Amino acid sequence: MKNKRNPIRSEQGQALVLIVLAMVVFLGITALAIDGGMIYADRRQAQNASDASSLAGGGIAAMSLENSWVTYNNWNCGDQKINTAIQAAQGAAITRATKNEFTIDTNIDDKHGVSVTCNNVFNGTWRDKYLNVQTYITHDTKVSFAQFVFGGPLKTTVEAVTRIRPRMAMAFGNAIVGLRETCDSHGGNAGGVYFDGTANVSVTGGGIFSNACMVASGSVDVNVYGGYDITCVGSGCLSTNGGPTVIAHDGGQIIEGTQHLPENSYDIPAPDCNAAGMADHGQHKGGGTISPGRYSEIEINNSKDDLTMQPGLYCVGSFKATGGKLTGSGVTIYVTSGDFDTSGNAEIVLSSPPARNCSYCPPAIPGTLIYLAKGNTGSVTLLGNENSDYLGVVYAPNGQIDAGGTSALISAIHAQLVGDTVKVHGNTDIIINFDGDMNFQIPAMLELFK
């Protein structure tokens, strides 16, 4: 009789197959975890080293540009001063990488090294000038299991880019700047920059920039000399009503751009009105000599008043000079809540603290003459007679700047006008001679760009 196999015994050994398969899967997961962790750790270490190397080079380059006074206005990629900064950046990047146990040189063809490039790029609205410190690190990760599949170590390549922009006057060195990004009304004037009247407005040393509209009306003539541009943002943003002329001479252009100014190109930190030595003087009216400190109000309105301001920071609720004579050398006037008004026939001769080597800054702000506090929507009115002179940045980030007059000639406005809205008007010649080296400067900046 034929014996039949026991059906239970015929299934013997199947558990062993499952165990073997499970072990293969388990080993695969273990290999992935171990090798993946090693690859991730090595990549993170290499990225940290690349970032540190790039930033070290950028920091040295920024210091070199600062010490040799390379600025936005004198930027030239063929300048030996910039070449010196490039060489210093390369050396610092290589040294930092060595300290982190990576060896790099100045050849990046194999994606392993450091490269420093000088750039002067027109982005459609303004020129961006900067150095890029670019570092690559390529590292081999010795794996434990993946080599059975790939046949060798795995390569990891990381990159870092530090961007250094040179010291520059606010807003890329434009002499008149409207910050408002919409074409709605402020004080009855549409647009960020507004020209009106019968004046001949002449600007040298910088361009004119509006983050939104630029409007010229009446019979005003606007002329920018020295090859600087007249720029507004938006299609059809420049409007000329009534036949005025707006001309950029000497190779300058009229640009209808697409990008607003970056905030870090025009921001001034607020001063400390409670710094040591900032006494509370209350209210001052009339002539005499006053010292820095806090004032609820400063006012002169009598033709015989002669007020002298000593150098330093003045934190003022409101400021009004409509008669007499006002002089102040090395002053920053910070208006906390009200207006700064020099309308009338007053003679105004004011200058800001020096843009470099200011011994009493802070609390005064180098190169800054008048500053309407952020959030203050008041006005700065810059009028005066033919002897009036303003030197330094006039900054009203949320307010309006009104510059002009009715005298025979306002001969010496050396100020940079940066406001939410800027109005230049009158029936006299208005000459703005802007010198970026004498106004507030934004120090060289660096950022880990990539």
Image (spheres, rainbow, N blue to C red):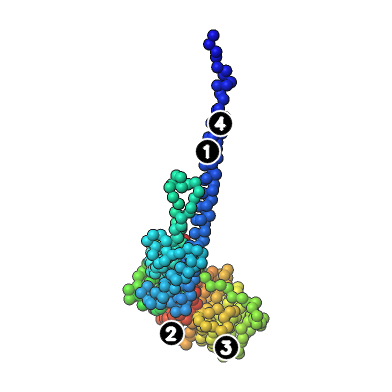
| Number of on-image labels | 4
Q: Are marks 4 and 2 in contact (CB under 8 Å)?
A: no
Please name the residue that numbered disc 2 is placed on: 411
Mark 2 residue crowding within 10 angstroms, few (<14) / some (14–19) / many (20+): some
Query: Disc 1 marks which amino acid?
Result: Val
Comparing labels 1 and 4, the label whose residue is closer to the camera: 4
Distance CA(mark 1)–CA(mark 3): 89 Å
Depth check: 222 or 276 in front? 276
In the rendered image, residue 417, in percent from the top left (x then y), is placed at: 48, 75
Residue holding disc 3: 308
Mark 1: secondary structure: helix
N-term-proximal mark, 1 vs 3: 1
Check disc 3 and give the amino acid type.
Thr
Q: Helix, strand, or loop for circle 2?
A: strand
Which one is closest to the eye, mark 1 or mark 2?
Answer: 1
**Residue named by callout 1:** 24
| Gap between marks 4 and 3 measured at Cα | 100 Å
Numbered mark located on residue 16 in the image: 4
Q: Residue at x 48, y 75 (%)?
A: 63
The quarter of the displayed image where residue 29 is located:
top right
Crowd around label 3: few <14 · some 14–19 · many ≥20 (10 Å): some
Work out whether mark 4 precedes mark 2 in sequence or the reverse, and give the earlier one: 4
Residue 271 lies, in percent from the top left, at 59, 75
Q: CA distance from mark 4 to mark 2?
A: 100 Å
Q: Secondary structure at mark 4?
A: helix
Which percent across, then down, holds residue 140? 46, 55
Q: Earlier in the sequence, mark 1 or mark 2?
A: 1
Discs 4/2, front:
4
Of the numbered discs 1 and 4, the one sitting upstream in the chain is 4
